[in-house]
Amino acid sequence: MDDKEKLSNPKVTIQTIQKYGFRFQKRYGQNFLIDDHVIRKILRAADITKEDTVVEIGPGIGTLTQYLAEAAGKVYAVEIDEKLLPILADTLSTYENVEVIHNDILKCDLNRLLGEGNRCKIVANLPYYITTPIIMGLLEGQVPAESITVMVQKEVAERMDAGPGSKIYGALSLAVQYYADTYLAANVPPNCFMPRPAVGSAVIRLTARKEPPVSVKDDRYMFRLIRTSFNERRKTLVNGLRNDPELGITKEAAEAALTEMGLPTTVRGETLSLVQFAELSDRLQP
Ligand code: SAM
C-alpha cells in the first residue's frame, strides 16, 4: 500500500473514522497514531523482519498494523473494542498475514495463540490506563516474547529505565529490569496522536533476558520486600520493612542484615540496587 493511503496520513484516519461514525472511547485509552516517522521508529526499535511473528496489543483502526503486516511474517492483533472490528476488516483487507483477535489482552493466552514453542515480538501503542498490568503480566507470565516494544507514557518509560539513586527509581524499575534489558528508543510529543493525549509519550524496548541478572532464593519474597521498601519512601528502609506483617521482619533482623552487607542502618530503599535487594531478601527471608 502506498504510504499516502495509509492511516498514518491524518486525512485517511479522519475519513475512516467519519465513514464508520467511530467515537473515541477514553476508557480504552484510544489515542491513534497519525505520524509515519514515529511508526517507522517503532518498527526500527522492534527490529521486525519477515521471519518474525508479531503480537500487536490494541490495533485501534489498524494504523501501526499496516506497517507491521508489511514488515513481519505474521501479525496477531488483539483488540478489546468490538466497534473497531468492522473498521479493521476494511483497513487491513489487503494484508493476508494479519489475524485480528477480539479479546482483552489481560485474558488472552498467548502461548495457546502462538502454539507450543513458537516465539514472538510484541509491539504496541499501549492503552496507558493499563500499561503496568500489561507489561508485568507479559514479563511474569512466561510469555514466549523475545522483545516488547511499546509506546507508553514518557514518565512510565523513564521509570522502567531508571537506576538506583534517581527520584523515579522504584518497584517498576526493578521488576522490569529483573526480566529484561531496557532501551529508550524515542520521545513522542502529543501531536503525533489523534486525539492528543494530555501527557508526553516514549517508545521503550524491553528485551527478555535469558537468565535473571541476580540469583535469589525466592523472587516473590524479594518483590514483596521491594514493593514495601518503595511504599514508604519517606521512611528508612528498616522502618518500612518492619511495618509489613507479611514479611515478618523485626527491626533488629533488618539492622543486622544491612550491617552485614556493609550498609548503614539508616539507608533508604531507593539507593539499593537489584543485587543488594536480592542479597537482603536471602538474608531476611524467614
Ligand atoms: N495501535 C493503534 C494506534 O497506534 O493508532 C491504537 C492505539 S490506542 C493507544 C490503544 C488501543 O488498545 C485501542 O485500540 C484500545 O481499544 C485498545 N485496548 C484498550 N484496552 C485493551 C485491552 N485490555 N486489550 C486489548 N486492547 C485494548
Image: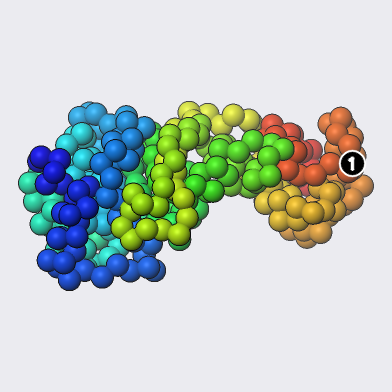
The residue located at (76%, 44%) in the rendering is 269
Determine which quarter of the picture holds residue 231.
bottom right
Residue 32 x %, y % = 30, 55
The residue located at (32%, 31%) in the rendering is 44
Horizontal side, residue 175 vs residue 255: left or right: left
| Residue nearer the viewer, 36 or 70 | 36
Whether residue 279 is visible to the viewer of this picture, yes or no, is yes
Determine which quarter of the picture holds residue 103.
bottom left
Horizontal side, residue 28 vs residue 168: left or right: left
For badge 1, the amino acid type reads Thr
The residue located at (21%, 35%) in the rendering is 72
The residue located at (39%, 69%) in the rendering is 27
| Residue nearer the viewer, 69 or 242 | 69
Q: From this view, report whether residue 26 is shown above or below residue 225.
A: below
Horizontal side, residue 215 vs residue 286: left or right: left
Q: Secondary structure at mark 1?
A: loop
Residue for badge 1: 265
| Residue nearer the viewer, 125 or 252 | 125
